[in-house]
Amino acid sequence: MSKPVRVEELDAELARVLGDTEPVAEARVLDVAVLRARVADDEGLLQELVGLFLEDLPEMQRRLRDAWSAGDATALARAAHHLKGAAANLAAEATRVAVIAVEDVARDGEVPAEAL
């Protein structure tokens, strides 16, 4: 995605990356109204938050994949928790909901055999 990031483009990109998995299908990918309210309609701050999220997203995804591949439930729970917080800050509810499911399973010491 190019900068400046438009919220609608971020919403579409998150939907593309995440897909419509069962636990998340009912959740909005990005709640634009909530996000705008959080930044008091400050477009510069919104751009900064989105930019930081997009910069960190590849590393967060890599940590999830690596922990999942290694069967490391502790690392998977930690990586999922990190992504959950980042998604919550950005009002990316579908991401947050999906990652909660992964984090919960990993905290129980299990690594899901496939994507939830």
Image (cartoon, helix red, strand yellow):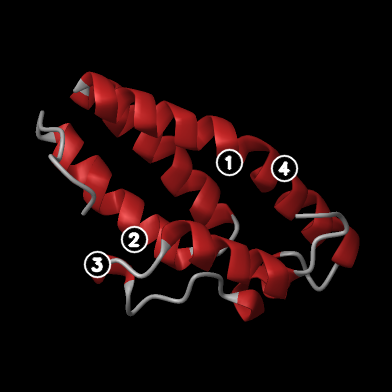
Query: Which residue in the structure is indicated by mark 1?
Result: 57
Residue at 19% x, 44% y is: 104
Q: Earlier in the sequence, mark 3 or mark 1?
A: 3
Q: Callout 4: 10 Å neighbours few (<14), some, many (20+)?
A: few
Amino acid type indicated by mark 4: Leu
Quick one: SS at disc 4?
helix
Task: Tell me which corner region of the image, top left, top right, bottom left or bottom right, holds residue 58.
Answer: top right
Relative vertical location of residue 27 with respect to residue 61 in this rendering, above or below? below
Circles 2, 4 touching at the beta carbon (< 8 Å): no
Label ID, residue 17:
none
Q: Earlier in the sequence, mark 4 or mark 1?
A: 4
In this picture, residue 46 sits left or right of residue 8: right
Q: Are marks 4 and 1 in contact (CB under 8 Å)?
A: no
Mark 2, secondary structure of its residue:
helix
Residue 81: quadrant of the picture? top left
Disc 2 marks a residue whose amino acid type is Val
Which comes before the other along the chain, label 1 or label 2? 1
Instruction: Categorize mark 1 by other alpha carbons within 10 Å: few (<14), some (14-19), many (20+).
Output: some
* Pointer 4 residue: 52
Placement of the N terminus among the 4 image quadrants: bottom right
Q: Residue beneath label 3, please?
A: 23
Cα distance between the residues tagged 3 and 1: 21 Å
In three-dimensional space, the C-alpha distance between marks 4 and 3, rounded to whole angstroms, equals 26 Å
Q: Secondary structure at mark 1?
A: helix
- Are dots 3 and 2 in contact, CB under 8 Å? yes
Q: How far, Cα to Cα, is label 2 from label 4?
A: 20 Å
Residue receiving disc 2: 97
